[in-house]
Image (cartoon, rainbow, N blue to C red):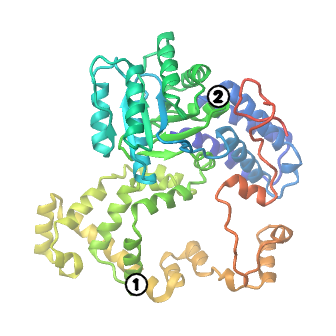
Amino acid sequence: MFESLSDRLGKIFDGLRGRGALNAADVDAAMREIRRALIEADVSLEVVRAFVEQVRERAVGAEVTRSVTPGQQVVKIVNDELVAVLGSDAVTIDLNAPAPVTLLMVGLQGSGKTTTTAKIAKRLKDRQKKKVLLASLDTRRPAAMEQLRVLGEQVGVDTLPIVAAETPVEIARRAEREGRLGGYDVLILDTAGRTHIDEELMVETVSIKEIAKPHEILLVVDALTGQDAINVARSFDTRLDVTGIVMTRVDGDGRGGAALSMRAATGKPIKLIGVGEKMDALEDFHPARIADRILGMGDIVSLVEKAAEHVTAEDAQKMAAKLKKGSFDLDDLRAQLLQMKKMGGMGGLMGMLPGAGQIKKAMAGANVDEKVFDRQIAIINSMTKKERANPDLLNASRRKRIAAGAGVEVSEINKLSKQHRQMADMMKKVSKGGMGSLAGMFGGKMGGMLGGMPDLSKMDPKQLEQMARQAGINPDQLKGLPSADLPMTDKLPTDVNKLLKSAGAPGLPGLGGAPRFPGLPGLGKKK
């Protein structure tokens, strides 16, 4: 969703990075381009003005003019301010209340409330082992209650039995009683929506709130609605005092303006984002990670978390043992292809790798077919167990048989065989000589980088200081860090803002205190 904005900002920063020094005119020109890029991305005008003002103040100060790399410093400032606009810290659903904890789902019709309700239920059941009860209060939309019942069956969560002719308030009372007597940890109420905000909708929802006394009121907003999403959020917040926002269709081709404007315009945190139609396509909203993605820095943390979800410890140990031996058969290749598919395919992975945006664009331009994984898995499945374990058995007649079984040309079998052979050779190189041997396979600049990497843990502090000077880093900034021969006892903070503060970086213009921009409760006062 943020691709067009990311492209525009990337071009602006490329122009800044190539300069040795920046003057006020350079900063003004960059700010004009950033303002234009944000407006084109459908970000609220008041948010754009506040954002550009905050960036400009820091960009024309001593923080940039005295910097060794002023272009990089401006990128860092924009990153910091993006994180501040998006909400600084990730906020999760709060379940710290007596059971059953009630969550009230509100929003307009078509925003994805019912599907999101089932997704949240599945998430709580699978990740936090909670016993969840779903109840539909939508008596207006045809088959709304039946839809929630079917979704509940799909995700393995109980739903409140449907009783005809009950009002939403009566259903809420019955759901609360059932949740208490049934020993449920969480009760999620799915309310009715409208095609637009009207007084009748608000009165009904307020009366449900008074009966259910929800611990969390989650507003479900469609990310593709753009500017109007902010008006919807403000209307619901005024009457219901929502505690968080769930944005759906974030994987769509919208311009991302609603996500960037929502926190600043309402002061309410975005807690979850829907990134697909499947029941597990729901992610926590991490402002720092989203900012990194927008600025083309990738999202390694999310990539690692995704890998941890789809790769079991047992599979990882088996792969490590095979890597140590240098063996890699077609069963292993199939396992790798399946894992890559689960993690979002090549495009999904490229979007999370730093600097891989250009490669992803090149893939799109070359019409790289993501279904190639499916075809390769079908080819491997068409082989016998012996053929998968020993690819050398694949002679011409066997390849013809496999091609007929998988419904592909023999050339596809040859391509897969070559790909496997290259990967197997790489595994053998790693098992024999480690990263140094692997570096030789890449050659050129990349090979030199991998092969010439020293072992930092065995280096003297003076050598590290010398390396820092060569890299343009002030060695005084490294003082206080644990020496190479002492074990590190403290873990690095997982939050980007804490990491910046621990390094002595200036604090972000966060929340709290009198608002600096009265119309934008999500932005803090001036430092």
- Please give the label number shown on residue 517: none
Residue 119 position within the rendered picture, expressed as x and y whole percent measured from the top left: 40, 41
Which residue lies at the image location 65% right of the left edge and 46% below the top edge? 89
Q: Are marks 1 and 2 in contact (CB under 8 Å)?
A: no
Residue 474 position within the rendered picture, expressed as x and y whole percent measured from the top left: 84, 67
Q: Which residue is mark 2?
A: 266
Residue 248 seen by the camera: yes
Residue 118 seen by the camera: no
Q: Is residue 352 above or below residue 315?
A: above
Amino acid bearing label 1:
Lys
Q: CA distance from mark 1 to mark 2?
A: 56 Å
Mark toward the start of the polypeptide (1 vs 2): 2
Which residue lies at the image location 27% right of the left edge and 36% below the top edge? 150
175 with respect to 293 (left or right) = left
* Secondary structure found at label 2: helix
Q: Number of labelled discs?
A: 2
Amino acid bearing label 2:
Thr
* Secondary structure found at label 1: helix
Q: Which residue is mark 1?
A: 428
Which residue lies at the image location 59% right of the left edge and 73% below the top edge? 445
Residue 333 position within the rendered picture, expressed as x and y whole percent measured from the top left: 32, 70
